[in-house]
Image (spheres, helix red, strand yellow):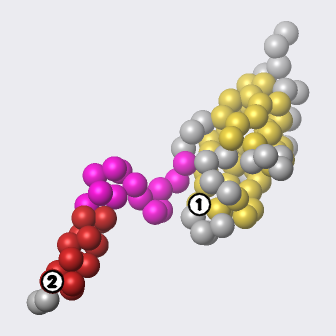
Amino acid sequence: MDRRSFAIRALGLAGCLALALSGADASAQTTSAVEVRVGETVSFALPRLVQIIDTEDHSIATMVVTPDGQARVTGVAAGRTRIVGRDIAQLPLIFPVTVVPARP
């Protein structure tokens, strides 16, 4: 094995090791929970540029993505749903959503 191929293999191994130690996983799903009250809206920054994203159940919560990459989730009825989408690399984005009753 010559020096060049040894160096390339060593760098590849080092990169794989760094990803493993950092906890990075290409198939990892985002699990940050979102909580919103009925009739209110919360905003949060999406971790990556999305290709498609929406709530699973529009009767519980709706959402829009603003041009600056913020997700705005509005509570419609008390319950649980998820925001499900894919980024531009086709990796999944999933956020659990809990909608709680409006304040009295």
Q: Quadrant of residue 61?
A: top right
Residue 104 position (above or below residue 32): above
Residue bounds of the magenta highlight = 17-30
| Residue closer to the observer: 46 or 54 | 46
Return the residue at label 1. Answer: 92
Check residue 25 for magenta coloring: yes
Return the residue at label 2. Answer: 3
| Residue closer to the observer: 95 or 76 | 95
How packed is label 2: few (under 14 Cα within 10 Å), some, or many (20 or more)? few
How packed is label 1: few (under 14 Cα within 10 Å), some, or many (20 or more)? some
| Res. 46 in view | yes
Q: Residue at x 59, y 60 (%)?
A: 92
Residue type, label 1: Pro
Location of the C terminus (image quadrant): top right
Residue type, label 2: Arg
Q: Residue at x 30, y 65 (%)?
A: 16
Q: Secondary structure at mark 1?
A: strand
| Residue closer to the observer: 13 or 53 | 13
